[in-house]
Amino acid sequence: MLKVYSWLTFCVVVWGSNFVFGKILVEDFSPGLLTSLRLLFIVVFLVGLTSYSKNFKRVNKSDVLSIVLLGVIGVFINQWSFFKGLQTADPTTSAIILAMTPILTGLLAALFLKEKLTVRMLMGSILAIIGIYCVVVIGGGSSLHFDKGLMWIVVTMITFAIMIIMTRVLSQRVDPFTITLYSNLVGFIVSIPFAFSLDTPLRMSSNMTDWALLIGTAVVVHGIATLIWNNNIRHVDASKASVLSNLEPFVAMIMGLILLSKPITGVEILGSLFILAGVMLSTYQRTIAI
């Protein structure tokens, strides 16, 4: 189990650092183009794995529409809104907001999958909202003001929660790797026209270091880390893995301090603790169903 949790922690560190690397990349690439290029390299990586393993699987006609919707909402919109938001949003604050995803996922699961909504989840949601308030409102100033970029990060959180629900339903009939491959392929195809219409002006770096960072993060963050997570999560309780994944804001804080020289404020720490407590309380659902 130590090996399993070590691999899961590795994934959390990779995903947490993605906020800082994404912030760096949007300085040199426009969001739409960055989304399209990143999805291209993810698809190339996944196709390469499929060719190597010779484990290509087709999707039933009845699942095609679901795969397309997943590719548009859970991949393209999710990726584009993430990079769009990071143009102005702080990476640490973005990571903290996305830490709300498990709670939103639980609420959607209760609504669409008829899973039980518990008192623990409601109490956890309140704690997490207090944490968001501390970071976004108190940390951003005395008035209730939300940065435009943070609104796009909220869209990222919502689409990510939808992606989890859709993947959960599809995985009952379709192999997870197949879902990942086809949904990213759909996301890439859809992103092509938007890469040139959403960005004005269109920005693309000519620096090889920037391209190496783009390709490396695409393959490692959304390719290797995702596959490692999916392979190891089978061996632990989903609730424990979910709590572990919410260490991402702390990773984003540390990476922001190291790579962007961004100081960690007391408000960020306080808000993160509230959100982490809320998510942990919501995730460990054992009693009192409503």
Image (spheres, grey):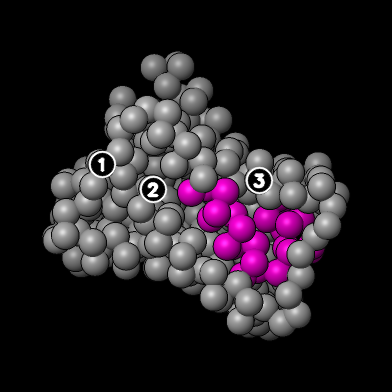
Judging depth in this view, the residue of 68 and 13 nearest the camera is 68
| Three-letter residue code for mark 1 | Lys
Task: Provide residue 83's location: percent of width, then percent of height.
Answer: 63, 64
Is residue 48 highlighted in magenta?
Answer: no
Task: Provide residue 203's location: percent of width, then percent of height.
Answer: 76, 70
Q: Disc 3 versus disc 2: distance between alpha carbons?
A: 17 Å
Query: Which element type, helix, strand or loop, lies under badge 2?
Result: helix
Residue at the disc numbered 2: 181
* Residue found 30% across the figure and 32% down from its top: 55
- For residue 75, which numbered disc appears in the image? none
Query: Which element type, helix, strand or loop, lies under badge 1?
Result: loop
Magenta residue span: 20-43
Query: Does residue 160 show up?
Result: no
* Residue found 44% across the figure and 42% down from its top: 47
Which of disc 2 and disc 3 is earlier in sequence? 2
Q: Tell me: 46 left or right of 164.
A: right
Task: Provide residue 116's location: percent of width, then percent of height.
Answer: 17, 56
Q: Disc 2 versus disc 1: distance between alpha carbons?
A: 10 Å
Residue at the disc numbered 1: 57
* Residue found 80% across the figure and 60% down from its top: 205
Which of disc 1 and disc 3 is earlier in sequence? 1
Quadrant into which the N terminus falls: top left
209 versus 86 height, above or below: above
Residue at the disc numbered 3: 215
Q: Main secondary structure of the magenta part?
A: helix
Image quadrant of residue 136? bottom right
| Three-letter residue code for mark 2 | Leu
| Three-letter residue code for mark 3 | Ile
Judging depth in this view, the residue of 243 and 149 nearest the camera is 149
127 versus 226 height, above or below: below
- Callout 1 environment at 10 Å: few (<14), some (14 to 19), or many (20+)? few
